[in-house]
Amino acid sequence: MEQLLREKETIRAAVFHENLSLLERDRAAAYFASQEQGAQVLLCSEIGSEGRNFQFANQLVMFDLPFNPDLLEQRIGRLDRIGQTRDIQISVPYLENTAQAILLRWYHEGLDAFEYTCPTGSAIYDQYYQQLVEYLAKPTVLDNFDDFIKSCRAKHNQLKIQLEQWRDRLLEMNSNGGQVGQDLANQIAEQDNSIDLINFSLNLFDIIGINQEDRSDNLIVLTPAEHILIPDFPVLPQDGCTIYLRSHSSTF
């Protein structure tokens, strides 16, 4: 395919598949991502649906469809990412009376998987797996196939509503914590505004025998005195150190 695009259509194409080394795959992805004289097309095997981000592109052609809805979403997700500024155009060429045609209708009419993300895909796939396999095995025998599509779509709509309701309840409970969250924020602010830690620290230094030399309003140099009670005071080197006192608490 890459050769035909290059020789017949003069289209620059990069290839991306399992038999390439990681370095070769990196080069192919970089060639496709290049703004100047880069590849116009990236030809991928299924490995192209994993781990790479191509949000600068918005045209996706699938010469085959995966059997699992999660894999379909992974493929589309390579382009449908943060940074994508355009609608993604998906093209799926297929032959009539083939398994590809069955999958295309199931994804599009049964799961609406090309128009939107499909969080219900795995659940519907598990429930209708056996029926789907039978239609794929005999794509020219479509008895009750329309009813099968309608049943999948009805289940999809039902599960989608349930997921949205659960999501809304979780957001309401956890998005800001309500009054409990506000009370916690007030407690944190009260502790931050307290100077108890600073006073405790300075008194501790006096008792143990640590010299304190002010360098500015917020900086103090600490050095061990000759008769320090604890010779190996934690985090205090022999030549001393400088600490910064914030307006509300102390930082070492």
Image (spheres, helix red, strand yellow):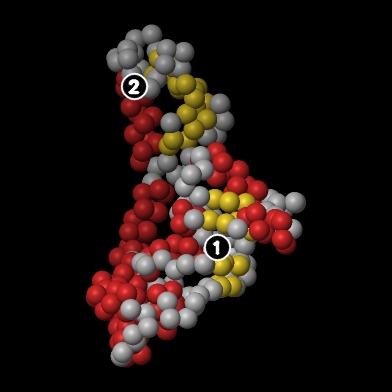
Q: Amino acid at mark 1?
A: Leu
Q: Residue at x 51, y 43 (%)?
A: 20
Screen quadrant of the N terminus: bottom right
155 sits left or right of 95 in the view: left
Q: Residue at x 30, y 15 (%)?
A: 230
Q: Nearer the viewer, mark 2 or mark 1?
A: 1
Mark 2 = which residue? 234
Query: Which numbered disc, 2 or 1, marks the residue that appears first in the sequence?
Result: 1
List x then y, in percent, for residue 42.
Answer: 60, 56
List x then y, in percent, for residue 97.
Answer: 43, 81
Screen quadrant of the C terminus: top left
Q: Residues within 10 Å of mark 1 (few under 14, many from 20)?
A: many
Q: Tell me the distance, in whole angstroms, between the alpha carbons under discs 2 and 1.
A: 53 Å
Q: Residue at x 42, y 16 (%)?
A: 237
Image quarter for residue 112?
A: bottom left
Mark 1 = which residue? 79
